[in-house]
Image (spheres, grey):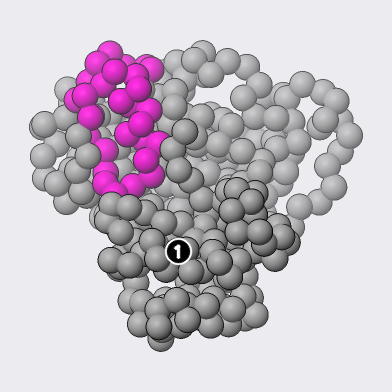
């Protein structure tokens, strides 16, 4: 199992701080989640129904011609490598490590490259895996440049996979509308933007043939009934989404200002997090954890990713702890 954020129970054991006393900034999940209503009893007692309108809501929300609901984009990340014969695969680095892990485990030849290198050498690979905006760096790409990369790969049977887990705050840069083109796969997550990570709900946007192959690989009922009910409502709530985008951008900018104020200048980021390279990242991570603040530590390069504090009290707590850690 690879390392991930959000392991609060482990932090409780390691530091002896009660679960409710933690400020968890380790995941990049929006702290301003969609307001979840009560779930009908039938959602628990009936088998999930593919015709319940969730796919239609996702198509409308993302502007994608075809979608497949899955148990979080993680389910697709693990299954997609099983749909190809051994291939030359380039995966962005630094980035969400599960992508490279899944392709390696499936027997493909992997190269980890930075974003600029991936765009510069499309003829070297059969599959290119990008995260847009990238996690944890926040790096962004011109959509038209990604379309050109896809065209080069698809012309010889290759794939471009774009993980858009953090795209909801800037939907104008999404490639979902182009995802009916063979060889283009776009992954979306309901967990980050809607604050519904526990629902384990995501969507794959791609051509129908690839989605059918993925559906066969994953099997029936990939997304639980209660999750389908909640996510379907959230996807249709356009008014809430517009307000959430503005709120996320403001909160991320405030976090960036806070980090600069204490001398920890962000190296990158997006609406959901800020990322700071620092040679003492591990020591800062430990010092914050000792005060009940959990961040996401990366080894290569040494860096920390900070999720958004949910309110002013949390921001002040973070700033005070950082000043002490950096002293």
| Residue 15 coordinates in the image, percent (x, y) | 60, 59
Question: Can you identify the residue that label 1 sits on?
Answer: 285
* Residue occupying the point 60% across, 48% down: 10
Indicate yes or no whether the magenta region holds residue 106: yes
Q: Splitting the image into 4 quarters, where does residue 162 fall?
A: top left
Q: How many labels does the image show?
A: 1
Local crowd size for mark 1, using a 10 Å CA cut-off: few (<14), some (14–19), many (≥20)? many
Q: In this view, does 164 lie to the left or right of 224?
A: left
Seen at 16% across and 51% down, the residue is 116
Q: Can residue 83 be seen in this view?
A: yes
Image point (54%, 64%), residue name? 289
Please state which of residues 238 and 258 is positioned toward the viewer in this rendering. 258
Instruction: Residue 114: say if magenta.
Output: no
Q: How far across and down, in percent of the image, does residue 34 sit?
A: 68, 57
106 or 124, which lies in front?
106
Foreground: 251 or 13?
A: 13
Q: Is 179 situated above or below 6?
A: above
Q: Indicate left or right for 88 with 35 as reference.
A: left
> Position of 284 compared to 153: left or right?
right
Q: SS class of the residue under badge 1? A: helix
Residue at 45 percent across and 16 percent down: it is 213
Q: Give the range drawn in magenta.
A: 82-110
Q: Is residue 117 above or below residue 153?
A: below
Quadrant in which the C terminus is drawn: bottom left
190 or 57, nearer to the observer: 190
């Amino acid at each position: 199992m690879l390392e991930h954020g959000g392991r609060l129970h482990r932090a409780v054991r390691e530091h002896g701080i009660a679960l409710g006393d933690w400020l968890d900034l380790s995941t990049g999940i929006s702290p301003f989640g969609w307001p979840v209503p009560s779930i009908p009893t039938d959602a628990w007692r009936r088998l999930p129904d593919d015709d319940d309108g969730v796919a239609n809501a996702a198509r409308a929300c993302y502007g994608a011609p075809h979608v497949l609901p899955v148990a979080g984009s993680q389910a697709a990340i693990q299954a997609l490598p099983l749909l190809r014969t051994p291939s030359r695969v380039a995966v962005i680095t630094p980035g969400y490590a599960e992508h490279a892990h899944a392709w390696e485990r499936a027997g493909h030849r992997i190269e980890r490259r930075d974003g600029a290198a991936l765009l510069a050498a499309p003829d070297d690979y059969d599959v290119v895996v990008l995260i847009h905006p990238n996690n944890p760096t926040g790096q962004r790409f011109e959509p038209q440049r990604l379309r050109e990369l896809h065209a080069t790969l698809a012309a010889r049977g290759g794939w471009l996979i774009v993980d858009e887990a953090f795209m909801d705050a800037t939907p104008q840069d999404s490639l979902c509308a182009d995802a009916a083109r063979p060889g283009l796969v776009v992954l979306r997550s309901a967990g980050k933007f809607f604050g519904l990570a526990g629902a384990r709900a995501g969507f794959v946007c791609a051509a129908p043939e690839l989605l059918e192959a993925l559906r066969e690989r994953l099997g029936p009922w990939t997304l639980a009934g209660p999750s389908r009910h909640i996510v379907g409502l959230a996807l249709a709530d356009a008014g809430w989404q517009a307000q959430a985008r503005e709120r996320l951008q403001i909160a991320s900018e405030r976090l960036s200002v806070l980090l600069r104020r204490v001398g920890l200048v962000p190296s990158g980021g997006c609406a959901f997090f800020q990322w700071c390279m620092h040679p003492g990242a591990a020591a800062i991570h430990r010092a914050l954890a000792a005060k009940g603040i959990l961040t996401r530590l990366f080894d290569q390069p040494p860096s920390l990713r900070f999720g958004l504090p949910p309110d002013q009290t949390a921001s002040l707590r973070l700033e005070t702890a950082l000043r002490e850690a950096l002293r």
